[in-house]
Image: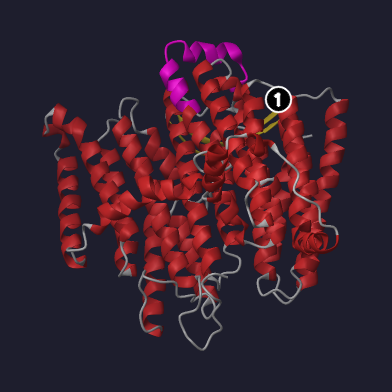
Amino acid sequence: MEKFIHLFILLPIVAFMVSVMIPKKQERLLSRVAFVSVGLQFIAAVLFLILWISKGTPILNLKEFSIYKANNYDFFIDFYVDRITLVYLLLGSLITFVITVYSRYYLHREEGYKRFFNAVLFFYSGFNIIIFSGNIETLFIGWEILGISSFLLIAFYRDRYLPVKNAVKVFSIYRIGDVGLILAMWLSHHLWHENISFLKINNTELVHHHLADNSLVGLAIALMIFISASAKSAQLPFSSWLPRAMEGPTPSSAIFYGSLSVHIGAFLLLRTYPFWEFQTIFKIILIISGALTAIIATFISRVQSSIKSQIAYSSIAQIGLIFIEIAFGLEIIALIHIAGNAFLRTYQLLISPSVVSYKIREQLYEYKPRIRNFEDTLPKRIENTIFILSLKEWNLDSLMYRYLWNPIKRIGGRWTWMNFKYIFYVIAFMMSLGLVLLYFSDKIDIEVKHQLPLFFSVFGFLIAIKAFSERDSVRKSWTLILFNHLAIAIAISFNAHFDWMHHVWYLSGVLGSWFVGLMVINYLRKREVWISLNQFYGHAYEHPKTALIFLLCCLGFAGFPITPTFIGEDLIFSHIHYHQVGLALFTALSLIINGLATIRIYARIFLGPHVKNYHEVAKRSS
């Protein structure tokens, strides 16, 4: 049975690598690689299910190998199989197979045909890593893959303004979920004193033993998991991103935001349920959040003029109910609900291009008066208030901007009086000061030494804000992101028993990505008139290979699992002590913002309407 698990993990990855090497003109071969590989995965899943049932439905746990081990820290790849895994496996393989068959005709002769199938196979690889993950570290690898593949598919029509803008917006919400998972890992290291596996979490006595004297830590971990799950599954207050994600092609909307990706938050809650099962406060929070999301999303969906938006908010409402079912411990009902919602939304989204013509025909030839509904029983003032709020989507999007992104931009905007030279002098002085203090750390007063990590982490956070709010110089923003990583490294270095080898893991990927990315920026500056961050330039149209190289640099810079930076970030957090909440918070915020700054640079330079007027440019509203 172990060989089946290896097949499920490796088959999509191999298919993705093969599809990358196929020329974009070979449409038939590209689609065939996709649906044959996923079809084989579905057949293997059915055979595995039969074998699994015949053997008495055993729980399987495979610890594959350790990527890095030091003292109490062990970053290992672990795979885990139970009925939750199998439901998601069958659901994912069947829906992905249907989508790949549908897409080969729907996207025929589309400019981004190859990009679409590459992104879908990349997404499916990450999806399989998540559902088979045996610990949070393994799950986080697939989690990151889902995030970047989602960004690429939303920005599929990369020559238009709105798809690219909304892709960056969705990625910003995903980034919050990513850091929630990182903080959950950090707290788990201190609670368990190891990288805990999901198999051990199922041990009720072990969980009770560790939570007996650490109930607040357990609640904090559960809340971080809730933030990650809510961000991924578009629950309040993160619901507004899901309709924006519908800017991609209809098949990608069906597979991502109708069926699979949007239910990953529910998977995370199901997988960690034994951990927070007896945390009553957390279950109340989960129930209230699910109920509010279901009610508000239902109201919003009823006033949407776009069919995709109606389906998106309807799906959000159902996932809110699924969260309530999970909170009550109704695992089987939740799994049935997930499968039903996924199949229904996939069907609705795939036929959505035809629904408009059906509705027009019904209005012309089969007119029916509006049926009296629940809202008509309410007082008129309340009904109108709900209607206006629903039209405005309860201001969820504007609230995120008002209380999260705009304050960050305002803080960074106050640095406009400083040009690159002055900022470089200030940062160089602070970095030098940090290195000097590290060298003489034995002679520093113990109280002062305890405050230094927080001081340098706050300084790094301010650098990240400046990188995010920079509007003029691409090189300045790109270099400020590097300085942010260096400030984080210095901040962590003041903690006792720090291993400098961990900085090698962390900074090797950062420095390599920064250097190659800077070479790409200089290459473009020599061939283009001007590049800033005030607008979209769309240079991927004329420089596709350069765009791909820079995207890989951005992923390495942001800690994506293609460079040692990914493991380095986890190592960095493993050295943040239990009581250093401020240090963990500002480090996490820095990772959120520098990831956004990185992807924003890529989007501004290479995506969006082309800056040259001899290329066809779509209208801003299209």
Q: Nearer the viewer, residue 378 or 409?
A: 378
Asked if the stretch drawn in magenta spans residue 209, the answer is yes
Mark yes or no: residue 564 visible.
no
Describe residue 394's horizontal placement relative to residue 349 as left or right. left
Q: Which residues are magenta?
A: 201-222
Estimate how packed mark 1 is, as few (under 14), some (14 to 19) or many (20 or more) residues with alpha carbons within 10 Å.
some
Amino acid type at image mark 1: Glu
Q: Nearer the viewer, residue 188 or 99?
A: 99
Residue occupying image coordinates x 88% and y 33%? 50
Q: Position of residue 428 (x, y in %)?
A: 18, 57
Residue that mark 1 sits on: 331
* Majority secondary structure of magenta residues: helix
Residue occupying image coordinates x 53% and y 39%? 381
Vertical arrangement, residue 253 with respect to residue 189, above or below: below
Describe residue 453's horizontal placement relative to residue 109 as left or right. left
Which quadrant would the C terminus be assigned to in this image? bottom right
Secondary structure type for disc 1? helix
Residue occupying image coordinates x 61% and y 65%? 156
Describe residue 608's horizontal placement relative to residue 254 as left or right. left
Which quadrant would the N terminus be assigned to in this image? top right
